[in-house]
Every structure is written in structure tokens, then in C-alpha cells.
């Protein structure tokens, strides 16, 4: 006996709705009531907030501009030129986007901090990188260039080559082809890319905290400070509301920008070709070199630094010992007295994997019913759809703040960490699963049923083979998000159950060669775990699908 | 005017165009006819300067175009998928070439408006090009290419994406415009009817070579090769064995064949069987008996197929299984010993 359809649909919605209401919307109302209450609107706050807001906009704008300076030439390179190793370079530029912020921060520490490679090669140089605005900007460029390459590069590659040939035959030289044709045609995609990059830079947390430090007060960092360091929850709530408002506004603009993307007919074959003239070669090869260096160096520097001894041993101030060492990894198994956490650091690996596993189960368990319901939505369900996306607008730190406000710092169980991770991952999981479910034509199921398959067999032989890939993608995505999530975790974790990013942050912010080495070792472990996940997704996605 | 000498081009390691030589005279419309993949579009790109030949030279008015970039050639180009600029309206699309020539805005306005009138698009100047129908888009593309007064107009399957009725209307319009403006044109198509109707001269392109060149009646009457006869859909192609001069043995018996070649006895040659509609038999014509295997109604009569795959046109209704007498003429499609041996060496049979 089957349950009648409307009833079944309601049953599908109940668990995800309870989850979202309980862990997102109720906390959101707490933030709203606290932030809009009179306690938040003190004179000090009203003076302080514009400064924080202004700096957030300033660093995000600057980061976006710099990202475009690298991203636009890179997009042109990928869209218009063919070269050896192109696919690998594309993957390389996309890797940072999925890397946890702590790993990227640790990678830049491994190169450019006072214990980094730079001081080995240039010991006399008085060079300060970590703790500057420059470090924040470089890391933002490292993260977001791939967005520009994907959005603008795809738009450029899809332009009908006939347009450019027509322009040339009508008397436009290359400069004027770019000025009058290609750049104007790229404008909508550039706008969309700029808004998205701005959004990520605007809500950036880990990069600013770990590479800039607390003197760089963005909205996100200030919220964190006002929750944990100098508690002022009303101010934190008010800042969260401002942050959420801005995020929603920019997201809305981004959606609009995407919709005015004119669909030009895709070329029947790729317009990319090998660079021919001297100028083209100079451009292509120098861009390839630049991208390889910029994206590969941090990723290589970190693991090598994690097994290198570059300083004097304890108590032996005279001689610098250098060589290969696994000491930092061994040290992860020791629970030294006075160490930062209550458990041996390597336990963080298991905590992280465990939380990631729970996140996968939760987000798939909640995401599947929603995706099913949304694949043939009723009117009401269409209305629910944007609500599901709302958590995307909330920053990680804000999610943490909401949960703290609703459930109280003291009551927190370690399970709130994967719950927060699920809030972050769920919208993505739904967006991966729903098109896959939609892609199965009803005819296939009917054909199978007519051929004599029972409903269960229909699902097993028709739905599952198509859905398994999407499910694996979604699961891997949720897993990766959970492994690297930093902002919410920092607010919610219990000292008995630290995660990898939290432990890495702890080591990075402490002085001493051993702490530094351990942060390198842990970051390397986290990087390897994440890379394995990325490769799983890419391996599933690469054949037959384009990169966008 | 335009002159190509021994132009060749490789594509991905395989020869795409081989030893192409031809000229286009002032005011002449030349049709480049060939199947897809025969290198037609590439030939246009070479002339436009969008690609460069591996060997051979392209002259215009006696000037070698080797070092002339596409934007300096003053050639117009019209594409099958139009290549209109989606970010510009109709007026700005047509004005593009004039702006590149840095014409004054008064002149631009005047010329664009006059061209809009000539292609029946007056009043369309503010429209977005993506909102236009296919035929309207193609007329914008045509006006855009012609507005800067090109020295040569090239059309790459310009009507390929349009339906039959629209095609015929536009074809007539295009002929009128070209006659008026005296601009020489190269028209590329794979549609033999379009080519035969439209052009002063036809060039048949096959496997990167020009296999036949002439006026449409010349080419149609004497296709000159089995491939060309099949491509132009002229009569039926058979194989026959020479038994003596001017006589060939076929599956329809021994037939007379008027042929200037000196074929050795026993040589197998391709022959073209054309239905003799005039009906008056003469020395070169003969009659064959066919058994009707299939009948297709065609409006002005019936097409019949016989048991060996040949098809003929008859005016009255016939029944399947009936025997018919058909008057025919025969043409030798032998391409000469040199071409034949070259083909043999490439394609072992």
C-alpha cells in the first residue's frame, strides 16, 4: 500500500523544515531581536560600525580588483589558447577554491612568515608579509581567480567566432575587436564574476583572521571578537544583520547579472588554438608560468615545510640545523602538558572525519527528500525554495552566533558542529541532487514498469545508476565543506572535540618552532584529505561535462 | 580582379585545399559548390585573410595580399549564422564597418538608412538583433557587409539556416543588389539548386580540389565526373566496359557512347545516362528497356525506379512490374588518365 501523494509530500518536507526552523530560522529571529533591540544601538557602536563596515567594503573591493587583474588575462588564456597541460592548469587554478582557509593560511605562512622559506633564502631581508593587508589580498586573489576564469572565460569561449571574423572583415584591427566587440560582450559575465568575487571577499573570515590578524576588523572578524573575545552579543547581532543584508543584496544583484547574460550560440568547435604570433606566444607562455607559480608554489611549499627542519634545536641557539624531519608529525601524537587542547592533537583528525561523516549523513538525509519534492514542485513548494537558500546568505560566523544565542554557550554539545556544517552544505547538496533527479525522464521509469519491474526494481535499475554519481558528488562536497569549515566551528567547538582547522589555528597563533611545525604538519594532513575529495569530485565530473 | 594561384592548406595534418587556382572577374558572381567538409569555408577564410595559406598566392588587382591583415582588405563577409553583434542594435550593426572607416556620423546615418531601405528593413534601426527572425537577421548581416562598399563580397552558406520560401525571396533580393552594385561576389553553398540559379559561374569543390568550373548550363550539361554528376543529381551513373570505340557494354546491353577519349578495349569507365526528353532519336541516342520496380508521384509526373537502381521521369502513370522503353543519351564521365591514376593511387579499390 502506498501513501497518497499529498501526504507523502508533506512527510518529505517535515524533517528538513524542522531542521531549518530549529537551527536556522529560530536562531535568526534571536539575532534579529537582539541586534535590533536598544542594547545594540549605543553611541559607541554607531561610531564604530561605519569604520568596520567601511574597511570590509574597502578590502573586498581591493581584492576584487586585484582578482580581476589576474583573472581576466587568465580567462582570456583559457578561452582562446590551446597549450600543453591546459586541463591540468585549469584544475590547479580551481583547487584553492575548495581548500580550507586554514590550509591556505598555513601555506602562506610556510612561504612568507618569519619561519617560512623566504627567510631561509633571504635571511637578512626585513620582510613582513603575514599580518599585512597585502597577505589578505594575495590570499583572496589565490582563492577567487578561478571564479573569474570560469564565469568570464566560459562566456568568452562561447562567443560565436563568426562575430569576431565579421568585425575583422569590417575593418576592425585586434585592438578595436577587443574594444568594440569582445569587452562589451564580456561585460555581463564580468559583472556577475565581480559580484560573486566581492561576495566571497566581503564575507571572508579565516583568511583575514589568520593572515591579517585581529587588527584588520571586518564585519566577520568583529562578530567573532564580540562573541568570544570581548563579548557584546547585541553588537555582534547588529553586525550580523548588516552583513546578512549586504550579502542578500549582492546575491540578488548577482542573480540579476546572471539572467542578463545573453546566450550567444555556442561555437560548434572550440575557438581555442595554439598561440601563433610572437606577441601571442609571449602572452600565453608568461601567463602559464605566472599561474603555475602563483597556484602551485603555496601548495608545494606547505608539505615540504612540514617535513623540514630549518632552525636551531631547543636550547641550541647557535647552529641552524636543516634537514628532513618527521618530528612535527610525531609530536601530533603527544599530549604535552600545557598544550592548547585537552587531547593529543591527532585526535582532531578523527574528530574532523567523524563530524564530516555526520554532516554527510545529515545533509543527504535532509537534502534527498527536498530535492525530490523540488523536482516537481507545487506552488507552495516553489515558495519554499528560496527559503532553503537563505542559509547561504548567512556567514558561517553568523550561523555560529545564532546557535549560541538560541541554545546557550554552556549547553552546547559537540553535535552542534556538524549541525552548523550541514546548514552550510545543505543548499549545495540540494542544488547538486535536484538537477540529477530532474534529468531522469518519467518515460524511463514507465518503460521499466511496463517491462515488468516492481517499483523497487525501477528505483534500483533506473534512478539509482543516474543518481549515484550526483549523490557521490553531493556527499563529497558536504564532506569537504565540513572538513575545512572554520568560522562556525571556531565559535561552537568543545575543547574536548577540536577539529583540524581549529587546532591549526591554535598552533598558528602560538609562538615557537614546534607549534609552527605542528601547524604545518596538520595543515598538510588536511590539505591531502581535501585534495583526495576534490579529485573524487573532479574524476566524477570531468569526463563528458564541461568545466562550468 | 581576385586571383588565386596554387593555393594549398593543410588542416590537422591532412590536406584540406590542394592547388586551388581561379579568378573572379569584376561584377561576376561565382558559386563555390561542394559537400560539407570540402574546404569551401576555409577557402573563404583564406581570401578574407582570417587564415593564411600554406602555399600559393592570393592577388587582388594584382597586389599580393600575403601581408594584408583582414581588416585592411575591404572584403565583406556574410555567415550562415549571421554573426550579428548582440550588444548592438540593427543600426549600430550596420554602422560597424563605417565606424571602423571613421566616417562622419551624418554619412553613417545616411548610408545605414539607405541600406535599411534596400533590404526592406526601414524602421528596424532601433530593434535588438536577437529579436529578429532568421530572414531579417540575414538581411541585417547583408546590409552590414555591404554598407562599407567592400571590394568583394563573400557569402558563406548565407541562406543555409532559412526555410525554402524565405530562401527564394532572399535569393532574388540578393541577385538584384549584386547586379546593381557591381560588387563581385563569391557564394559558397552545398545546395546545387541555389548555385545553379544564382551564379554566373560555378566551381565544384571536391576533396579540396576544383573538379569542374564553368557557367551553370555548361556544368550541368557536362558534369565531367561521376562524383559531379551524382552531386548535381544529373541523370544516372553506371559503369560500362569499352568493347570498341564509341561502344560500351552495360547491364542494359551495348550502347553507343560519343566520346573524344581514346579508351583501350576492355577499360571500365563511368558513364552518365541522361533521359532523352526531346524524344527524337539520333546517332548519339538510344533506347533501353526497363522494368518498373517503384513509382513515386512527383506532381508533374512520376519518378520510376527500375530493378537496377536507375531512375527516370515519366509523364503518365505506370504500374509496378510494367516494362518501359526509355530514350536516353550517354556521356563518358572518364576524367582522363592523369586524374584517374591519381585517384587510384589514393584509394585502392
Image: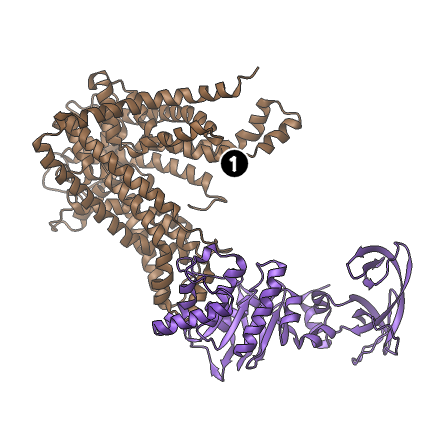
Who is closer to the viewer here, B185 or B177?
Answer: B177
Q: Which of B58 and B30 is in front in this view?
A: B30
Residue at disc 1, secondary structure: loop
Q: In which quarter of the image is residue B332?
A: bottom right
Q: Chain A is drawn in which colour?
A: brown
In the figure, the shade used to draw chain B is purple
In the rendering, at what x and y percent does residue B264 appear? 82, 77
**Residue position for label 1:** A439
State the residue at coordinates (88%, 57%): B318
Q: Position of residue B307 (x, y in %)?
A: 85, 57
Image quarter (top left, top right, bottom left or bottom right) of the C terminus of chain A = top left
Residue at x 35% of width, y 21% of height: A19
Farthest front residue in view? B123
Q: Is residue A41 visible?
A: yes
Q: Position of residue B163 (x, y in %)?
A: 61, 58
Residue at the limit of the structure toward the left, as seen here = A44
Placement of the N terminus of chain A among the 4 image quadrants? top right
Quarter of the figure with residue B322: bottom right
Q: How many labels does the image show?
A: 1
Q: Along the horizontal axis of the image, is A418 left or right of A545?
A: left
Crowd band around label 1 with a 10 angstrom C-alpha radius: few (<14), some (14–19), many (20+): few
In percent of width and height, residue B125 lies at 43, 63
Q: Which chain carries label 1?
A: A
Residue A344 in view, yes or no: no
- Residue at the spot 61% in from the left edge and 22% down from the top edge: A454
Q: Is residue A179 above or below residue A204?
A: below
Up the image or down, B300 lies above or below B174; here it is above
Judged from this view, the residue extending furthest toward the right is: B323
Write down the quadrant of residue A99 in the picture.
top left
Amino acid at each position: 500500500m502506498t501513501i497518497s501523494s499529498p501526504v507523502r509530500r508533506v512527510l518529505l518536507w517535515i524533517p528538513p523544515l524542522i531542521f531549518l526552523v530549529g537551527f536556522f530560522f529560530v536562531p535568526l529571529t534571536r539575532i534579529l531581536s537582539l541586534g535590533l533591540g536598544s542594547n545594540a544601538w549605543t553611541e559607541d557602536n554607531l561610531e564604530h560600525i561605519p569604520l568596520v563596515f567601511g574597511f570590509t567594503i574597502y578590502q573586498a573591493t581591493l581584492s576584487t580588483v586585484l582578482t580581476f587583474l589576474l583573472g581576466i588575462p587568465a580567462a582570456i588564456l583559457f578561452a582562446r589558447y590551446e597549450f600543453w597541460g591546459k586541463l591540468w592548469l585549469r584544475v590547479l587554478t580551481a583547487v584553492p577554491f575548495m581548500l580550507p582557509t586554514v590550509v591556505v593560511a598555513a601555506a602562506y605562512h610556510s612561504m612568507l612568515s618569519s619561519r617560512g622559506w623566504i627567510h631561509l633564502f633571504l635571511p637578512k631581508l626585513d620582510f613582513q608579509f603575514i599580518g599585512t593587508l597585502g597577505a589578505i589580498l594575495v590570499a583572496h586573489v589565490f582563492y577567487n581567480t578561478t571564479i573569474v576564469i570560469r564565469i568570464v572565460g566560459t562566456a568568452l569561449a562561447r562567443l560565436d567566432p563568426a562575430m569576431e571574423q565579421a568585425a575583422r572583415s569590417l575593418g576592425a584591427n585586434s585592438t578595436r575587436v577587443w574594444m568594440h566587440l569582445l569587452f562589451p560582450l564580456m561585460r555581463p559575465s564580468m559583472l556577475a564574476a565581480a559580484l560573486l568575487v566581492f561576495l566571497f571577499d566581503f564575507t571572508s573570515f579565516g583568511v583575514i583572521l589568520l593572515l591579517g590578524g585581529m587588527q584588520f576588523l571586518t564585519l566577520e572578524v568583529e562578530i567573532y571578537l564580540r562573541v568570544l573575545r570581548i563579548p557584546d552579543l547585541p553588537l555582534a547581532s547588529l553586525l550580523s544583520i548588516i552583513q546578512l543584508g549586504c550579502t542578500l543584496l549582492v546575491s540578488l544583484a548577482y542573480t540579476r547579472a546572471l539572467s542578463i547574460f545573453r546566450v550567444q550560440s555556442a561555437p560548434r568547435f572550440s575557438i581555442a588554438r595554439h598561440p601563433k604570433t610572437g606577441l601571442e606566444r609571449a602572452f600565453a607562455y608568461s601567463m602559464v608560468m605566472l599561474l603555475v607559480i602563483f597556484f602551485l608554489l603555496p601548495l608545494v611549499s606547505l608539505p615540504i615545510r612540514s617535513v623540514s627542519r630549518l632552525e636551531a634545536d631547543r636550547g641550541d641557539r647557535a647552529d641552524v640545523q636543516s634537514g628532513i624531519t618527521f618530528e612535527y608529525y610525531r609530536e601530533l601524537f603527544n599530549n604535552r602538558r600545557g598544550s592548547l587542547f585537552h587531547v593529543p592533537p591527532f585526535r582532531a583528525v578523527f574528530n574532523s572525519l567523524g563530524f564530516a561523516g555526520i554532516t554527510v549523513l545529515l545533509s543527504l538525509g535532509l537534502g534527498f527528500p527536498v530535492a525530490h519534492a523540488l523536482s516537481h514542485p507545487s506552488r507552495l513548494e516553489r515558495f519554499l525554495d528560496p527559503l532553503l537558500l537563505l542559509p547561504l546568505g548567512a556567514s558561517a560566523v553568523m550561523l555560529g552566533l545564532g546557535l549560541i544565542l538560541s541554545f546557550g554557550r554552556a549547553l552546547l554539545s559537540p553535535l552542534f558542529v556538524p549541525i552548523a556544517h550541514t546548514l552550510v552544505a545543505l543548499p549545495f547538496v540540494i542544488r547538486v541532487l535536484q538537477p540529477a533527479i530532474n534529468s531522469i525522464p518519467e518515460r524511463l521509469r514507465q518503460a521499466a514498469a511496463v517491462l515488468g519491474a516492481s517499483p523497487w526494481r525501477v528505483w534500483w535499475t533506473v534512478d539509482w545508476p543516474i543518481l549515484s554519481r550526483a549523490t557521490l558528488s553531493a556527499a563529497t562536497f558536504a564532506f569537504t565543506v565540513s572538513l575545512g569549515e572554520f568560522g562556525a566551528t571556531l565559535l561552537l567547538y568543545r575543547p574536548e572535540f577540536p577539529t583540524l582547522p581549529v587546532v591549526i589555528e591554535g598552533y598558528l597563533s602560538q609562538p615557537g618552532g614546534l607549534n609552527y611545525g605542528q601547524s604545518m604538519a596538520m595543515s598538510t594532513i588536511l590539505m591531502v584529505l581535501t585534495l583526495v575529495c576534490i579529485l573524487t569530485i573532479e574524476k566524477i565530473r570531468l569526463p563528458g561535462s564541461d568545466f562550468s | 580582379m581576385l586571383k588565386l594561384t596554387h593555393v594549398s592548406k593543410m588542416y590537422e595534418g591532412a590536406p584540406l585545399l590542394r592547388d586551388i587556382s581561379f579568378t573572379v572577374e569584376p561584377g561576376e558572381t561565382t558559386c563555390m559548390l561542394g559537400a560539407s567538409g570540402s574546404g569551401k569555408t576555409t577557402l573563404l577564410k583564406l581570401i578574407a585573410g582570417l587564415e593564411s595559406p600554406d602555399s600559393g598566392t592570393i592577388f587582388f588587382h594584382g597586389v599580393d595580399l600575403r601581408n594584408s591583415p583582414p581588416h585592411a582588405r575591404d572584403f565583406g563577409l556574410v555567415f550562415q549564422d549571421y554573426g550579428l553583434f548582440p550588444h548592438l542594435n540593427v543600426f549600430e550593426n550596420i554602422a560597424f564597418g563605417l565606424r571602423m572607416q571613421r566616417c562622419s556620423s551624418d554619412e553613417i546615418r545616411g548610408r545605414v538608412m539607405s541600406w535599411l531601405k534596400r533590404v526592406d528593413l526601414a524602421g528596424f534601426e532601433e530593434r535588438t538583433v536577437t529579436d529578429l527572425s532568421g530572414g531579417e537577421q540575414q538581411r541585417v548581416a547583408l546590409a552590414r557587409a555591404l554598407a562599407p562598399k567592400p571590394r568583394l563580397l563573400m557569402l558563406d552558406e548565407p541562406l543555409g539556416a532559412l526555410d525554402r520560401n524565405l530562401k527564394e525571396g532572399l535569393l532574388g533580393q540578393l541577385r538584384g543588389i549584386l547586379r546593381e552594385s557591381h560588387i563581385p561576389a563569391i557564394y559558397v553553398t552545398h545546395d546545387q539548386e541555389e548555385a545553379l540559379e544564382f551564379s554566373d559561374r560555378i566551381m565544384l569543390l571536391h576533396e579540396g580540389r576544383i573538379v569542374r568550373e564553368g557557367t551553370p548550363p555548361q556544368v550541368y550539361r557536362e558534369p565531367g565526373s561521376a562524383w559531379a554528376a551524382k552531386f548535381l543529381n544529373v541523370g544516372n551513373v553506371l559503369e560500362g566496359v569499352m568493347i570498341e570505340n564509341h561502344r560500351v557494354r552495360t547491364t542494359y546491353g551495348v550502347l553507343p557512347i560519343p566520346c573524344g577519349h581514346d579508351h583501350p578495349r576492355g577499360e571500365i569507365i563511368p558513364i552518365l545516362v541522361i533521359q532523352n526528353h526531346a524524344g527524337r532519336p539520333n546517332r548519339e541516342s538510344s533506347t533501353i528497356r526497363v522494368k518498373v520496380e517503384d513509382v513515386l508521384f512527383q506532381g508533374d509526373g512520376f519518378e520510376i525506379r527500375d530493378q537496377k537502381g536507375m531512375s527516370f521521369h515519366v509523364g503518365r502513370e505506370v504500374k509496378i512490374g510494367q516494362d518501359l522503353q526509355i530514350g536516353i543519351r550517354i556521356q563518358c564521365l572518364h576524367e582522363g588518365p592523369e586524374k584517374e591514376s591519381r585517384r587510384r593511387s589514393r584509394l585502392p579499390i
